[in-house]
Amino acid sequence: MAGVAGTVVMTVFSFMSHYLNLPKSDLHEVIASHLPLGDLVSWVVYFGFGVGLAYVYGDHVRMRLPYHSYLRGMIYAAILWGVMGMIMMPLMGMGFFSGSIATAITALIGIGLYGATVGYLYEH
């Protein structure tokens, strides 16, 4: 449930970022544009990643990180953001950290919200 909740929070932020005058950072759109699966299946894959990464956090990473609750989740999210920006985005042809510092910061905020939610829900 923590993975679903974290993914929902991150998704809401990505939809709201336009209204906050932030660059678009929509991980669902990245998945949908690189995997020709159709809209419903791309949402299932997107939420599957969110749930899977929350499982990795809870089962393998959580107790190895300092602090507790949402701070642990935010540290985990920063690690995910770094891996995504330095490895996944260039592999998908989007450039190092999507080629823009503003987009990278928006992604960090969204993934940070995901991590904070997952971290908080795992410990409460």
Image (cartoon, grey):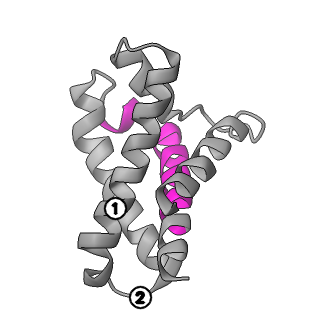
Image coords of residue 13 (percent x, y): 65, 46
Q: Which residue is mark 1?
A: 55
In the image, what residue occupies the spot 34% across and 24% down? 94
In the image, what residue occupies the spot 39% across and 14% down? 37
User: Over which residues does the magenta segment extend?
Assistant: 96-116
- Asked if the stretch drawn in magenta spans residue 111, the answer is yes
Residue 8 visible in rendering: yes
Image coords of residue 15 (percent x, y): 68, 35
Residue 78 visible in rendering: no
Q: Nearer the viewer, residue 88 or 46?
A: 46
Q: Which residue is mark 2?
A: 67
Q: Secondary structure at mark 1?
A: helix
**Quarter occupied by the C terminus:** bottom right
Q: Secondary structure at mark 2?
A: loop
Q: Nearer the viewer, mark 1 or mark 2?
A: 1
Label 1 Cα crowd, 10 Å radius (few <14 / some 14-19 / many 20+):
some
Q: Looking at the magenta stretch, what is its main secondary structure?
A: helix
Amino acid type, callout 1: Tyr
Label 2 Cα crowd, 10 Å radius (few <14 / some 14-19 / many 20+):
few
- In this rendering, the answer to whether 82 lies above or below 16 is below
Tally of numbered tags: 2
With 71 as the anchor, is 84 left or right in this view? left
In the image, what residue occupies the spot 51% across and 17% down? 39
Image coords of residue 104 (percent x, y): 45, 43
Cα distance in 3D space between marks 1 and 2: 19 Å
Q: Nearer the viewer, residue 113 or 49?
A: 49
